[in-house]
């Protein structure tokens, strides 16, 4: 059976804008923005999982009051979890809602200025601050938090924050500050800030810190930090937490592990490799130049023992050789000569290209890594052009070879058939990645270096006891490659020590790697990010399924609603949700904690739900809960209707043990009275959630 993997470890190689300062935009077409006054970036890295909180203070120096639109060049693969701002002595927080974000520029006109369009990158985040008019001569502070996995390659992890703000503002900023803290279960051999002279840099082997502060300087240089992990400590490193309550039925436990099996006892698997190059007319200019460069790089980095071929296509199909040939100096030289002869002209015959390439794998076996890398910048215009017919055609060709082939597809520019490339990858243990016009050479070469040395083909993970594990992703498991890692997140129903076995084919033999992981029985305050990592990977898994169905189909719509529900419940932005509206954060007054009775047992459950009163209610009710531990946090109370749609978000500052309450006035986020019926509320403490229901009767 063949599978499609959107592999997060592959995505980590695809840089682009990874981190950057936000922008308060007043007029998008003209590039009019508030002045950036200072920037503070706090990065907490736990075994390559980064929680980034980036805070900027802006000054309205425009000569008039305005409602800005917040723009942040969110890195691909990152998931925003919180957006809030401080203005006129009050914190406000944006609400995650089931609405696709509005990417239109503020101000007259429909196009972003060239500089802002370049700065925002491929996956920007937008938020309309319609309720916050910033008065002339005043400051607003905006804070965004997001989670992502840092890129890893052969023991080296890289953190990059493009702090170059000159596309937006070319003037000094009062303060630029970066605080970076790393906690690692695997020994940290080295850490350095390669971009700046760090003010502080420490490393005790398992905890490392980096800090830098710049005063009154132009932000024109990216922050870059690299750290090396011990190559003598390969294996599995995992962590877990168990919450008191969660908004689903998969189990209250969350785990994540990072696995890098040690292949030292196994020879790297040989490849049977084909590169399919689009040379149709639309590839002319810079794209065909990049395609030739990428193909040359791959041919120059094949391994001794690999078999390879190159197929190029436009209206007609040509092949470097009639069959796969051994990688030798002579074949290498001839292949580069063939690549340099390619020119762009004609139509796009995708079916013809696969009809030439796939049957050549007839003599391959499952003991080799059988790989096709296919890149194109357009839709099929000749041969088989209907999407499903073309998918079926390729599937039949692969079936006839009676072997497993991994097909990795790269779509270039805005005119590719995304559904086709996604389905071809889904059926053939690959991935589909979509690139900007100028990304081809960089992305293809980086991707090839990742898959160059396969360690385990068609791996499977088994858990013992299997009954306690639920919803583990990615599923199915991608092939494992030398110097790369696999990051798995899942759920568990009860605390125990589980066995984890990786098994698959390596060097003509069946191999297994065995590990153990302790699943804890308590909420670990240092692992509060685990539910969000799981939700992020679950959403990525569902997005693959979503794209496998036709847009607007019942199946796709059902998956879409599930993605929305997970996004809202776990506070992780998805393709179908965005930050909308706002809630003011109560810092006292009506939400103050009551005096704690002397009989309060601090060692009891950390949180207790005391219900809401009155219930049923009309028009308002007070939601009450008790905290039995020390904490100084913002607690969110999300209210849902019977359909699972979010109705209202309340926020309350809690400080230490006590009984707290907050009133809901029976109105929604637009301050309109809601209808009679049953409503559910979820009190989110960060490391635990308490839920209950209430009835509004009018």
Image (tube, grey):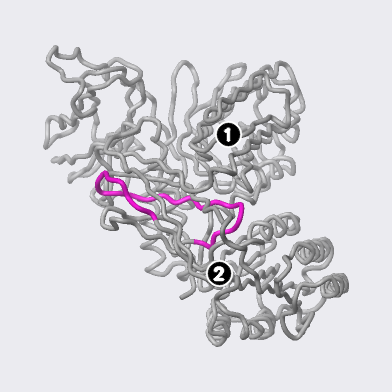
Q: Tell me which segment is drawn in magenta.
A: 478-500
Q: In which quarter of the image is residue 660?
A: top left
Magenta stretch: helix, strand or loop mostly: strand
Locate residue 288, reporting x and y percent.
Answer: 81, 66
169 or 17, which lies in front? Answer: 17
Q: Quadrant of residue 678?
A: top left
**Of label 1 and label 2, which has the lower sequence position?**
1
Cα gap from disc 1 to disc 2, whole angstroms? 36 Å
Residue positioned 42% across, 46% down in the render: 256
Locate residue 180, reporting x and y percent.
Answer: 58, 27
Q: In this view, does 55 lie above or below 510?
A: above
Q: Is residue 594 left or right of residue 333?
A: left
- Residue 569 visible: no
Residue at image mark 2: 425
Residue at image mark 1: 188
18 or 60, which lies in front? Answer: 18
Locate residue 119, reporting x and y percent.
Answer: 69, 41
Please identify the quadrant where the C terminus is shown: top left
Label placed on residue 662: none
314 or 644, which lies in front? Answer: 314
Residue positioned 57% across, 46% down in the render: 103
Q: Quadrant of residue 33?
A: top right
Q: In this view, does 398 lie to the left or right of 414?
A: left
Residue 489 covered by magenta stretch: yes
């Amino acid at each position: 059976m063949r599978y499609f993997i959107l592999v997060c470890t592959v995505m980590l190689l695809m840089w682009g804008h990874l981190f950057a300062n936000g922008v308060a935009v007043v007029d998008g077409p003209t590039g009019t923005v508030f002045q950036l006054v200072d920037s503070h970036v706090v990065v907490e890295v736990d075994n390559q999982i980064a929680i980034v909180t980036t805070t900027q203070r802006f000054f309205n120096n425009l000569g008039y009051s305005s409602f800005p639109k917040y723009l942040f060049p969110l890195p691909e693969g990152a998931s925003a979890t919180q957006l809030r701002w401080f203005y006129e002595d009050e914190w406000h927080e944006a609400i995650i809602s089931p609405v696709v974000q509005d990417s239109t520029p503020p101000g007259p006109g429909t196009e972003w200025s060239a500089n802002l369009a370049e700065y925002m990158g491929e996956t920007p985040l937008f938020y309309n601050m319609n309720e916050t008019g910033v008065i002339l001569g005043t400051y607003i502070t905006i804070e965004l938090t997001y989670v992502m996995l840092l890129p890893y390659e052969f023991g080296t992890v890289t953190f990059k924050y493009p702090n170059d703000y000159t596309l937006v503002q070319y003037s000094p900023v009062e303060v630029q500050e970066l605080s970076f803290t790393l906690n690692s279960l695997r020994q940290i051999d080295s850490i350095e800030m390669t971009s700046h002279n760090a003010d502080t840099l420490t490393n005790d082997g398992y905890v490392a810190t980096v800090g830098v502060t710049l005063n009154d300087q132009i932000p024109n240089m990216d922050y870059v930090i690299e750290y090396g992990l011990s190559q003598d400590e390969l294996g599995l490193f995992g962590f877990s937490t168990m919450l008191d309550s969660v908004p689903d039925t998969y189990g209250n436990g969350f785990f994540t592990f990072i696995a890098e099996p040690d292949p030292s006892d196994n020879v790297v698997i040989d490849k049977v490799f084909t590169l399919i190059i689009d040379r149709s007319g639309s590839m002319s200019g810079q794209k065909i130049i990049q395609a030739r460069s990428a193909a040359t790089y791959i041919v120059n980095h094949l391994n001794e023992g690999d078999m390879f071929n190159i197929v190029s296509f436009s209206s007609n199909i040509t092949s470097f050789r009639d069959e796969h040939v051994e990688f030798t100096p002579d074949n290498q030289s001839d292949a580069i000569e063939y690549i340099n002869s390619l020119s762009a002209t004609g139509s796009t015959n995708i079916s013809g290209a696969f009809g030439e390439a796939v049957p050549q794998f007839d003599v391959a076996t499952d003991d080799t890594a059988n790989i096709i890398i296919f890149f194109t910048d357009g839709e099929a215009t000749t041969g088989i052009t209907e999407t499903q017919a073309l998918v079926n055609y390729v599937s039949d060709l692969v079936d006839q070879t009676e072997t497993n082939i991994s097909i990795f597809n790269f779509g270039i520019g805005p005119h590719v058939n995304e559904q086709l490339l996604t389905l071809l990858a889904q059926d053939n243990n690959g991935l589909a990645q979509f690139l900007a016009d100028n990304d081809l050479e960089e992305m293809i070469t980086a991707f090839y270096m990742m898959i160059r040395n396969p360690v385990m083909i068609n791996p499977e993970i088994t858990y013992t006891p299997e009954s306690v594990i639920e919803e583990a992703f990615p599923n199915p498991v991608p092939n494992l490659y030398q110097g790369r890692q696999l990051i798995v997140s899942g759920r568990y129903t009860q605390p125990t020590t589980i066995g984890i076995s990786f098994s698959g084919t390596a060097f003509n033999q069946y191999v297994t790697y065995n590990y153990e992981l302790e699943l804890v029985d308590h909420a670990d305050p240092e692992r509060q990010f685990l539910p969000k990592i799981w939700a992020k990977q679950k959403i990525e898994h569902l997005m693959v399924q979503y794209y496998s169905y036709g847009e607007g189909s019942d199946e796709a719509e059902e998956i879409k609603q599930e993605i929305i529900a997970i996004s809202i419940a776990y506070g992780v932005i998805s393709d179908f949700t965005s930050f909308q509206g706002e809630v003011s954060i109560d810092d006292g007054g009506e939400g103050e904690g009551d005096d704690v009775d002397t009989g309060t047992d601090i060692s009891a459950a950390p949180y207790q739900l005391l219900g809401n009163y009155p219930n049923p209610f009309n028009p308002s009710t007070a939601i009450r809960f008790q905290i039995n531990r020390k904490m100084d946090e913002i607690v969110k109370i999300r209210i849902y209707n019977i359909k699972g749609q979010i109705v209202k978000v309340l926020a309350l500052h809690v400080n230490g043990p006590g009984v707290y309450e907050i009133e809901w006035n029976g109105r929604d986020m637009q301050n309109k009275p809601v209808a009679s019926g049953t409503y559910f509320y979820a009190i989110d403490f960060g490391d635990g959630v308490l839920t209950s229901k209430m009835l509004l009767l009018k």
